[in-house]
Image (spheres, rainbow, N blue to C red):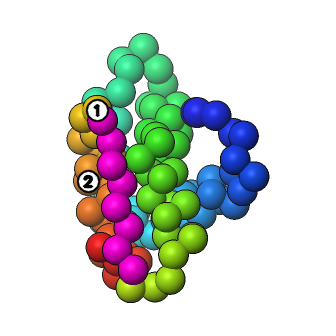
Amino acid sequence: MGGKSHLETNKVYLYSDELMSMCREAGYIPASESMMHEVEEEQREHALGYHSEKLAVALGLLKTSPGVTVRIIKNLRMCEDCHTAIKYISVVTNRD
């Protein structure tokens, strides 16, 4: 969705996909109703998967050692889906 100028963009996106797959296995259901209504369901879920918050968490998990807390600071409100997904990510990765 966003910029892809980071040197490890592909790695972050692949890990984000892996995290979302693990979360779905744990019971996470994307809150696609909070997205644009004129977009097909599959496209909404794809767009939700690449919100900056999820990508930031994926990068933080990739770049820190197990057990280290990852903090994401945002100056705007986080969408409902990101909030739920990050709770699941915390559980499936056993990280705060």
What residue lies at 36% left-to-right and 18% top-to-bottom? 37
What residue lies at 57% left-to-right and 71% top-to-bottom? 63
Quadrant into which the C terminus falls: bottom left
Say which quarter of the image contains residue 25.
bottom left
**How far is the residue under mark 2 from the one under mark 1?**
16 Å
Residue in front for this viewpoint, 76 or 30 = 76
Q: Is residue 37 above or below residue 31?
A: above
Say which quarter of the image contains residue 41.
top left
Whether residue 56 sits left or right of residue 27 in the image: it is right
Quadrant into which the N terminus falls: top right
Whether residue 38 sits left or right of residue 11 in the image: it is left
Q: Which residues are magenta?
A: 68-75
Can residue 96 be seen here?
yes
The amino acid marked with disc number 1 is Leu
Q: Earlier in the sequence, mark 2 or mark 1?
A: 1
The numbered dot on residue 24 is: none
- Disc 2 or disc 1, which is closer to the eye? 1
Q: Which residue is mark 1?
A: 76
How dense is the environment of label 1, judged by Cα within 10 Å: few (below 14), some, or many (20 and up)?
few
Q: Which residue is mark 2?
A: 84
Q: Position of residue 34 (x, y in %)?
A: 28, 30
Residue 23 part of the magenta-drawn span? no
**Element type at marker 2?**
helix
The amino acid marked with disc number 2 is Thr
Say which quarter of the image contains residue 10.
bottom right
Q: Position of residue 80 (x, y in %)?
A: 24, 41
Residue 71 part of the magenta-drawn span? yes
Residue in front for this viewpoint, 60 or 31 = 60
Q: Main secondary structure of the magenta part?
A: loop
